[in-house]
Image: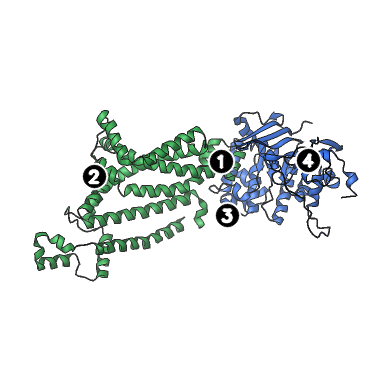
Chain colours: A blue, B green
């Protein structure tokens, strides 16, 4: 089966005053229809840049290389006019800040109708009916009335539901969700994640979820891609990754997740900070913070190697099972 | 919306009362006895003076004078010009259409140049079109109006002979001649304001183009021109409207230098003449009319904000 979305060796560089800075380096993954992939990492690891590169929404000073194929079509190479049909039509995106992602000058209904009419021949009244149906589907109470409300009258959770309705209204095959719940209250977070899972199961829309929160990953994703400093550190199914993480960075991230079933005096953290794209360390980029570091790590770039069925990790010392006793 | 309008109009009344107090106070501070000035040759005759004082209510206490004056103003009686020997209201009504015509033409020119130039400059930020627009705007702001006026008269009237160098023909008399006599001064006034509008439109648009909702609009697959003209511009217009209202107010209160250069008989010329001739009732009347124009323009700007930005409706 051909993958729905296939990303190969994606690299993104930004032109800065200090020359070209490469923020994303050699990211590859593929997504099958209806699957949900989480891209996880700390701020600055390149996960949002990866998402924006797929949408071709990067700032003008950025350059993306490699290939992004959506149903076989090279997204990075198609003309702008075709890209506009894909954007919102086949591949939609929602963002971290529901408070500012909707235009304050237009009603939420108008903003959904605008997306529907951009990608279909629906008449204004048909588009209105569809928009109201979507508002109902994302569980906004009194959708007919909410249709004519301006965004400032809605809470953050409601606005994110509107964003989801707007993104899903054209029945995209892929939805990219960039930290969709980060700005929301914990109880609202769970509701939004449930909604996204439900819609993806009902419509068959695949999801690429960008997050720094492993709790969110466990809620929603089938597969996980862990990114560190612009590169893929590890990729596996959710179960495999949570059970047998094979990259020291993933192990560190797990340690940083608070768990309710364990008594912990303080949250584990990873020593040090994410390096800057202006000065990536040579060799393995995690080496300066890695508890298992050996001399070779500082000079050799670790390749992504298979450590189990459907499980790859970029660590020359993987599998890490022999450290398990020590860790 | 109706509630907002009623509240906003209600706020105007105290403002206008305050303005009227200021203007009435000004009258009291002015040197010289109006009765003496009006009496002319007969200023030696105490009977004449007393009669004039009684006619103008100058023999009553101040607060009564204010109420009587306000009552007259509300009925459209702005007093009597000492110099022109005509009612101030009549003098102002003669000059007002000239200045309004000139002001509106200049404002239209300013908006037609300034706002599109600001948008282009913001969208093409840090690229040649932006540099050119900024350069032209800087030139527009730095060029004195009277100098640009003289240069235009030299080029279009003296050398090319296309337009009359000065004078004014009313719209009602001959609209073609009227436009021919006002287009140069309107352009001179408009370009200066266009430059200011351009700078403000540019900065508001640069800010709007960086907002999350612009990214959302692009993510929907909208064409860039819709993203710019609909999503960004609508939000960027609020500060531009504020500035536009103030600039239009300035235009409608008379462009002294430009009217002098083109010998246009508008407000600006009226005020200058009145000040030089110490024709205080005219000065006062003009100040009052200008104040009312400003207050009304601000009201119009506020109403426009609310139409553009629904968040302000409940503020």
What residue do we see at 78% from left, 48% from top? A253
The quarter in which the N terminus of chain A is drawn is top right
Which percent across, then down, holds residue B65? 24, 67
Q: How many numbered discs, if any?
A: 4
Contact (CB < 8 A) between labels 3 and 4? Answer: no
Q: Could you tell whether B63 is left or right of A210 in the image?
A: left
Q: Is mark 1 on a helix, strand or loop?
A: helix
| Disc marking residue A153 | 3
- Tell me the residue that label 1 is attached to: A124
> Which is more foreground, mark 3 or mark 2?
2
Q: In this view, does B87 lie above or below B195?
A: below
| Residue B110 is at least partly visible in this image | no
Q: Could you tell whether B191 is left or right of A295 in the image?
A: left
The subunit carrying tag 2 is B
- Tell me the residue that label 4 is attached to: A233
Label 3 to label 4: alpha-carbon separation: 42 Å
The subunit carrying tag 4 is A
In the image, B165 versus B14, the foreground residue is B165
| Disc marking residue B265 | 2
Label 3 to label 2: alpha-carbon separation: 52 Å
């Amino acid at each position: 089966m051909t993958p729905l979305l296939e990303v190969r060796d994606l690299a993104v560089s930004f032109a800065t005053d200090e020359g070209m800075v490469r923020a994303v380096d050699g990211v590859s993954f593929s997504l099958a229809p209806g699957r949900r992939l989480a891209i996880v990492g700390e701020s600055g690891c390149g996960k949002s840049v990866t998402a924006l590169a797929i949408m071709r929404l990067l700032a003008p000073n950025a350059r993306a290389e490699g290939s992004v194929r959506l149903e076989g079509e090279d997204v990075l190479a198609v003309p702008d006019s075709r890209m506009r049909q894909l954007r919102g039509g086949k591949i939609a995106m929602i963002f971290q800040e529901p408070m500012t992602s909707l235009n304050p000058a237009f009603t939420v209904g108008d903003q959904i109708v605008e997306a529907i009419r951009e990608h279909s021949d629906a008449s204004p009244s048909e588009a209105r009916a569809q928009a109201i149906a979507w508002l109902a589907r994302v569980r906004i109470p009194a959708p007919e009335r909410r249709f004519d409300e301006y965004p400032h009258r809605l809470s953050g959770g409601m606005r994110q539901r509107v964003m989801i309705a707007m993104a899903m209204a054209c029945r995209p095959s892929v939805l990219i969700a960039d930290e969709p719940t980060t700005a929301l209250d914990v109880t609202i977070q769970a509701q939004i994640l449930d909604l996204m899972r439900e819609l993806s199961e009902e419509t068959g829309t695949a999801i690429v979820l960008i997050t720094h929160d492993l709790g969110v990953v466990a809620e929603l994703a089938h597969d996980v891609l862990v990114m560190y400093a612009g590169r893929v550190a590890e990729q596996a199914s959710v179960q495999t990754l949570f059970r047998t993480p094979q990259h020291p960075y993933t192990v560190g991230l797990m340690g940083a997740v608070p768990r309710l079933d364990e008594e912990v005096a303080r949250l584990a953290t990873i020593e040090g900070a994410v390096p800057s794209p202006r000065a990536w360390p040579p060799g393995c980029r995690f080496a300066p913070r890695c508890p298992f570091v050996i001399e070779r790590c500082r000079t050799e770039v670790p390749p992504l190697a298979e450590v189990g069925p459907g499980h790859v990790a970029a660590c020359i010392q993987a599998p890490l099972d022999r450290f398990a006793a020590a860790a | 919306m109706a509630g907002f309008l009623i509240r906003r109009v209600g706020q105007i009344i105290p403002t206008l009362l305050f303005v009227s107090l200021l203007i009435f106070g000004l009258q009291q501070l002015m040197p010289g006895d109006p009765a003496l000035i009006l009496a002319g040759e007969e200023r030696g005759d105490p009977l004449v003076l007393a009669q004039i004082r009684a006619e103008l209510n100058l023999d009553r206490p101040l607060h009564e004078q204010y109420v009587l004056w306000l009552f007259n103003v509300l009925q459209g009686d702005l007093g009597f010009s000492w110099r022109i020997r005509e009612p101030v209201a009549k003098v102002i009504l003669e000059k007002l259409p000239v200045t309004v015509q000139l002001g509106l033409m200049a404002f239209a020119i300013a908006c037609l140049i300034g706002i599109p130039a600001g948008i282009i400059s913001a969208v093409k930020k840090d690229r040649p079109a932006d540099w050119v627009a900024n350069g032209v705007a800087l030139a527009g702001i730095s060029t004195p109006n009277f100098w640009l006026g003289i240069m235009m008269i030299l080029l279009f009237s003296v050398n090319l002979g296309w337009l009359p160098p000065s004078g004014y023909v009313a719209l009602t008399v001959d609209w073609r001649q009227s436009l021919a006599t006002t287009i140069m001064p309107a352009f001179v006034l408009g370009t200066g304001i266009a430059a200011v509008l351009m700078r403000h439109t540019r900065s508001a648009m640069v800010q709007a183009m960086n907002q999350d909702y612009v990214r959302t609009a692009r993510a929907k697959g909208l064409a860039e021109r819709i993203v710019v003209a609909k999503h960004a511009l609508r939000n960027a217009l609020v500060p531009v409207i504020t500035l536009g209202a103030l600039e239009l107010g300035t235009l409608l209160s008379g462009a002294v230098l430009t009217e002098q250069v083109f010998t246009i008989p508008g407000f600006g010329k009226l005020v200058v003449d009145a000040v030089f001739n110490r024709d205080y009732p005219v000065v006062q009347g003009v100040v009052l009319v200008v104040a009312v124009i400003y207050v009304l323009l601000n009201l119009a700007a506020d109403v426009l904000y609310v139409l553009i930005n629904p968040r302000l409706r409940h503020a």
